[in-house]
Image (cartoon, rainbow, N blue to C red):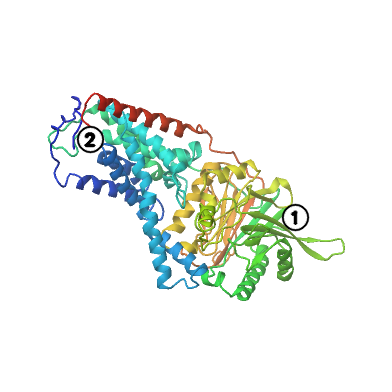
Amino acid sequence: MIRLPQNSSGASPAKPEGGSEAPDSLRLPLILSASAGIMIPLGFDPWGLAFLMPLAFMILALATDRCGFRRSLLLGWVFGLGVQGASLPWITLAAKNYLGIFVLDDPGSLSAWAAGIGLFLVWWPLSSLGWGFCLALVSLAPEASGARQRIWKCLGIIIFVALYEQYWPRLFPWSVGSGLATPEPSMGWVLLRQWGVEVASLVIAGSGFLAAHSFPLVFDFFDRRQRVVTLSRVWLLIPGLAVASLTLLPLPNRGSSPQLHEAGPEVVVSLVQPAIPLEDRHGSKWNELNEALISELHFVERIANRGGDPENSNVRYLTVFPEGMIPGVHDAGSLRRWAKMADFDQPLLSGVMVETAEGFANAVALIEPVRSGSGVRDYSVQLGFKKDLVPFGERIPGESIFEALGWKPPITGLVAGDRPIVFDLGSSENGFGVSICYEGLLPGTSRGLQESGAQWHVNVTEDLWYGNFLEPAQHLQLQRSRSLESSLPLLRCTNAGLTVAFDPQAFGQQTFLAYRNYWDEPTWQTIESAGEIVLEEEIGDTGTLQVRLRSHPQIRKGPFLEWPQGWAPILGGVWTLAGLLRIVLQRQRGLPRVD
């Protein structure tokens, strides 16, 4: 490899053209890049080692220091393999379950497992390649001496991490900054609330790259001939240390102390976790499933007014079932008939598969009991369709191209909604937003719900697709980060995942007043601080989490400081054009090329 001559700040001189590298010259950078990549998922739940994430980018900066475009592309790709490789347990399981149930009709078969593993082996390197392009483009930073070179690299990683998270095609988009979303109040909440999840990613990456400059061997990490350490670099370590400590420092909760029975309207929400196996939900046992759900619905109604609920006409009730829980395929008319057969007295929100003139839709239905003038019971039905569909699960990217080639994908594409889902309980002032499954982790969902008048956010999902190891906890953390960003309280109802109530209001008036898990705590427990309440720690348990909340919480839309829209593509284009121009000029001047 031929290096450009470097200056007296500690860089080594260029090797003569034609000089050879040791055969293992890439071994250490590759090991460091892979190790740094693995640190990123370790920063998420269930491990929660978020302090490792700035360190990961610091190590990545060291591994790619003084590397040209091609070597940075390789090392960035290896970094991506480490990041995405932690998805093996749940990507494989999700594909195996989906194809086994809907295509092969045998989720436990060898063919289903082979299909799941095969999909991961295709997805893993392609998804990881985005990090390779990110680091390759960072390598186009202008040559500079001392700390200026590191600051240029820091600016580059900020630009291209922003572009990666916004535009690189991924099955399940997620942001590095979501790792700061702890279950209990921490200083990480302040950054997420102030700037949002995506900017938190840039702070993590940028602070790590700055910290790399203070590392004693930054210029000669792979060249033992030089050792340059100056106190002037120490200040660059401060941002990385500050970011690493955010999740370790508790955030004092300044919320007002709630009263259990306050005057004014309240809402009691019952989050039901039925824990029904996937094979039963999507098989032929619809009658048994239907009977079990109706029995659960009546049980929740019986316990709703027990254990300390005041007899207050202002109290409104809502029972929530998870994603796709009502058996069969319905429309508004069939849902009304189902409700009459079930004969329940309180509003029910449930996921359901709906058939429309355009096709099938993953939807939610709010079914409310009403009485006519003659006293005959009836039900009103409001429907909302999932707006953002899962690639290769609910929609096929490029499906029209496949059909033009004469191949019909084995997965039926669903009909997408065209607006955020917002319902109300009794009046337009009691609006609440609904998202289905992974919609809750997308950056535009909470914003759309806020703009549509939602006061709190209900997410219905099914985490059994992903097994019981990594993804349920990570899926919850991604949704938790959006709750912190937007200030919308989160009520998350799963079939057999992690059913929780999360209040992001560490300052000002709390949203949740009390809770109970009726199986363990039949009496109401007063909530005295912001944070998370979990129904069951173990995946697959059944239960009902009931939460009392204010019907008019004090919601301040967030994040507080908006980041300029569209800045990353503009800066990325300028950066890339400037870098390519420098390469052309270097070649015209006959300077040696950096590999």
The kind of residue on which mark 1 rests is Ser
In the image shown, does 277 or 560 lie closer to the viewer? 277
Q: Quadrant of the C terminus?
A: top left
In the image shown, does 322 or 398 lie closer to the viewer? 398
Residue 218 is labelled as 2
Q: Residue 2, relative to residue 44: is it above or below?
A: above
Q: Residue 365, relative to residue 561: is it above or below?
A: below
Residue 144 visible: no
Q: Quadrant of the N terminus?
A: top left
The kind of residue on which mark 2 rests is Val
In the image shown, does 441 or 498 lie closer to the viewer? 441
Q: Secondary structure at mark 2?
A: loop
Name the residue tied to disc 1.
313
- Spatial distance from mark 2 to mark 1, Cα to Cα? 68 Å
Determine whether, in the image, residue 6 is placed left or right of residue 443. left
* Residue sitting at x 14%, y 32%: 15
Task: Compare marks 2 and 1 and give the one earlier in the sequence.
Answer: 2
Q: Can you give x and y, in whole percent of width and height, for residue 417 in the image?
A: 62, 51
